[in-house]
Image (spheres, rainbow, N blue to C red):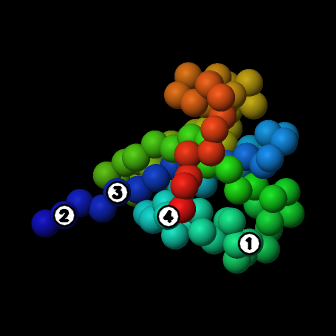
Amino acid sequence: MSRRIYYVYILTNRWKTVLYIGVTNNLRRRMSEHITHKNNGFTKRYNVTYLIYYETFHSIREAIKREKRLKEWKRKWKEELINKHNPTWKNLYHG
């Protein structure tokens, strides 16, 4: 029996002025939706398409718990987390 993987991810825009935190069970599909602006909302409005951080989980409950926790963090804390793993904030998504 294979275990499903869930992702908590952080996106930004070209200018790194906004951060978006989300959760999904298919990061490739979800990134495609963000890049093509499939859904109206925050990521479309602010052109948030750069994947700069993600974590994996085997439990959807744990992933959602982490997403909610990160959304409560101050921006400075989020930046420190990103910088620890991706100091240049390079786009980690390559299609």
In the picture of the structure, the residue carrying the numbered disc 4 is 28
> Which SS class for mark 3?
loop
Callout 4: helix, strand or loop? helix
Nearer the N terminus, badge 3 or badge 1?
A: 3
- Gap in Å between the C-alphas at discs 3 and 2? 9 Å
**Nearest to viewer (mark 4 / mark 3):** 4
User: Counting other residues with Cα less than 10 Å from the Cα at mark 3, is it few (<14), some (14-19), or many (20 or more)?
Assistant: some
Q: Are marks 3 and 2 in contact (CB under 8 Å)?
A: no
Q: Quadrant of residue 37?
A: bottom right
> Whole-Å distance between the Cαs marked 1 and 2?
31 Å
| Amino acid type, residue under disc 2 in the picture | Ser
- Picture coordinates of residue 89 (x, y %)? 66, 34
Question: Which residue does the image show at 56% across and 22% down from the upper left?
Answer: 84
Indicate the amino acid at tag 1: His
Residue 26 as seen in the image, left or right of residue 22: left
**Between marks 4 and 2, how big is the CA–CA gap?**
19 Å
- Circle 2 sits on which residue? 2
Residue of label 1 = 37
* Image-quadrant location for residue 77: top right
Check if mark 1's residue and mark 2's residue have beta carbons within 8 Å.
no
Name the one closer to the observer, 92 or 56: 92
Q: Is residue 68 above or below residue 4?
A: above
Dot 4 amino acid type:
Arg
Point out which mark residue 5 bears.
3
Q: Hey, what amino acid is under mark 3?
A: Ile
